[in-house]
Structure formats: structure tokens, C-alpha cells
Image (cartoon, rainbow, N blue to C red):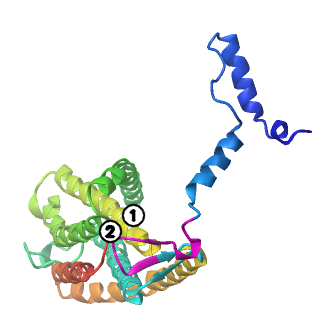
């Protein structure tokens, strides 16, 4: 059998038949798609270029990929800085998740709070209602994230988006304890005011956490290729598991101790200072 016939695309033949039935005429190009691919491959690499000499460089001179080996040779400093920043961001988000849940569900102690600094207890939300709030806010933030992430990535650098998410976390840490003072038991405001702040802050936190984690993980991922990327992902998963266990335990003890002394607001504002440190460190990251 002729080799060219054996490589004929059945789909193209069927397509030609359909075009004839619709009186659209046959395709004008000649040769099979494999011939076109072979020709493109022959034109892709000039005989004057040695494959061993090819390398692809990013705008950052610290990152170089050798095409022959297919392995990135990356400055250890950039790898460490990106990974360390991810650890800080994960600590920040873990503390928010664990302690915000405690703030939402702890009973309000009206005698031990005074705007804007003195705070003991929390919002007193029912354990039966919090899953509904979390699920709804998580779903809305996910939809907004999917709709907006590609637009942001086109208009801004990854590092800029990551830094913006860190700043947003700082704003959330600053505002979160003040929601307590809008509760009807303390302020006399209608219920919908405190509910509005709870939903808005929770949705914003879910969204900011998704955006920030996505950006820093992409920055880490871009430093590696092949088996190196798989190993690094394994290290990150191990680190995340360890932080997910220890960070809430330590933060919970600190939060409980400060809450017993009516210093609940101070705990969250200390987290603002921690967020500022995470942002300062992010200034050394490269896109």
C-alpha cells in the first residue's frame, strides 16, 4: 500500500464529501496534513543553528532553561524567597480561617467590650447558621474569582496581584473585630447591618485568599520544570500540612489569652502588623 494513502485523513475525506453535498466545492489545498506538518517541522529549525546552543531566557536573568535538558537552572535565592512568601501567606490565611470562626461563634460579652479597643467574646452566631454563611460566601467568591482572574492577569503582573491580596488581608484583619460593635445587643442597630458586614468580609476573605495563593503558587511553579516541579509541589504540600496543624493551635492559644483580658481587638491588629511584614517581604519577589 502506498504510504501517502495510508496516511490519508478519513475525517478530511468525509468533510470533502459533505462539502460536495452542500455544493461548497472541495478543498483547494493539496497534500495531507502530515505533509504540511513535516514541511513545518523542516522549516522550524535551521541547519545553521545548533540545538545544544539554544536556551530560553526570561526577562529575569536569574531564570534560564536549557532546552536540551529541559530543566530550569534557577537562582536558589528566588526559589527560597517565593517559597518563604507562600509560607507566610498560608500562615496569614490559616489564622484568619481558624480565629474568625471562633470570633463569629463565641458569645458576645456586653460588659467587657467598649469601642474601639476593648473586646471580649464574639458575635454569638449560631453553629447551625455559620455553615450556611460560609458555603454561600465561598460559592459567590469562587464565581467572582473565575470571572475576574484572567482579566487581572492580563492587566497586571502576577507579583502586583499577589501584593494587592496581601494588602487586602491587612484591611480585613483591621475591620473584622470592629464588626462586633455593630451587633444589636451592643449598638442597637438592626440585625441586617451586622449580617451585611459578616457576609461581605467573609466573601472578600475567600476571594483574596484564592487570588493570593494562586499568584504565589504560579510564581513558584514557573521556577521549575518536569520532575523538579513535582518534587517542589511535594515539598509545598508537606509544608502546608505542617502549618495547617501547628498555626491554628498556636494562634488559638494567643487569641484565647488576649480575649480573657479583653484584648481581642489587639490580637487582630497585631495580625495587621504581621501582614505588613508579609507585604514588605513580597517587595523582594520578582515577576
Which residue is farthest right? 1
Q: Is 189 situated above or below 56?
A: above
Residue 126 in view, yes or no: no
User: Could you tell me residue 276's position as x and y percent?
Assistant: 19, 80
Residue that numbered label 1 is attached to: 127
Q: Is 100 situated above or below 40?
A: below
Residue sitting at x 28%, y 84%: 255
Q: Where's the N terminus, which quadrant?
A: top right
Q: How many C-alpha atoms fall within 10 Å of the one at disc 2: few (<14), some, or many (≥20)?
A: some
Task: Quote the CA–CA distance across marks 1 and 2.
Answer: 7 Å
Residue 172 belongs to the span the image colors magenta: no
The magenta segment is 48-64
Residue that numbered label 2 is attached to: 105
Q: Choose between 68 and 89: the one closer to the eye.
A: 68
Which residue is farthest left? 115
Which image quadrant is residue 35 in? top right
Residue sitting at x 64%, y 47%: 39
Q: Earlier in the sequence, mark 1 or mark 2?
A: 2
Residue 263 in view, yes or no: yes
Q: Choose between 76 and 201: the one closer to the eye.
A: 76
Which residue is farthest front? 48
Q: Secondary structure at mark 1?
A: loop
Amino acid at each position: 500500500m502506498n504510504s501517502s494513502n495510508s496516511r490519508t485523513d478519513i475525517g478530511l475525506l468525509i468533510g470533502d464529501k459533505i462539502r460536495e453535498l452542500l455544493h461548497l466545492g472541495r478543498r483547494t489545498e493539496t497534500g495531507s496534513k502530515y505533509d504540511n506538518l513535516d514541511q513545518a517541522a523542516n522549516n522550524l529549525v535551521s541547519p545553521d543553528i545548533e540545538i545544544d546552543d539554544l536556551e530560553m531566557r526570561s526577562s529575569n536573568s536569574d531564570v534560564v532553561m536549557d532546552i536540551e535538558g529541559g530543566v530550569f537552572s534557577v537562582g536558589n535565592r528566588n526559589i527560597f524567597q517565593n517559597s518563604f512568601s507562600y509560607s507566610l501567606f498560608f500562615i496569614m490565611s490559616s489564622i484568619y480561617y481558624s480565629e474568625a470562626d471562633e470570633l463569629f461563634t463565641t458569645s458576645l460579652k456586653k460588659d467587657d467590650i467598649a469601642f474601639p479597643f476593648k473586646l471580649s467574646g464574639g458575635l454569638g452566631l449560631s453553629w447551625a447558621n455559620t455553615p450556611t454563611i460560609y458555603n454561600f460566601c465561598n460559592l459567590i467568591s469562587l464565581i467572582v474569582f473565575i470571572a475576574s482572574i484572567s482579566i487581572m492577569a492580563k492587566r497586571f503582573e502576577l507579583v502586583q496581584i499577589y501584593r494587592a491580596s496581601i494588602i487586602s488581608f491587612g484591611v480585613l484583619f483591621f475591620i473584622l473585630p470592629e464588626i462586633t460593635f455593630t451587633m444589636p445587643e451592643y449598638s442597637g442597630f438592626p440585625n441586617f447591618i451586622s449580617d451585611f458586614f459578616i457576609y461581605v468580609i467573609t466573601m472578600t476573605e475567600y476571594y483574596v485568599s484564592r487570588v493570593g495563593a494562586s499568584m504565589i503558587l504560579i510564581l513558584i511553579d514557573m521556577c521549575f520544570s518536569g520532575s523538579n516541579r513535582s518534587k517542589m509541589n511535594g515539598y509545598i504540600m508537606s509544608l502546608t500540612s505542617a502549618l495547617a496543624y501547628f498555626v491554628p493551635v498556636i494562634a488559638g492559644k494567643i487569641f484565647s489569652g488576649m480575649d480573657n483580658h479583653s484584648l481581642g481587638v489587639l490580637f487582630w491588629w497585631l495580625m495587621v502588623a504581621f501582614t505588613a511584614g508579609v507585604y514588605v517581604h513580597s517587595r523582594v519577589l520578582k515577576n
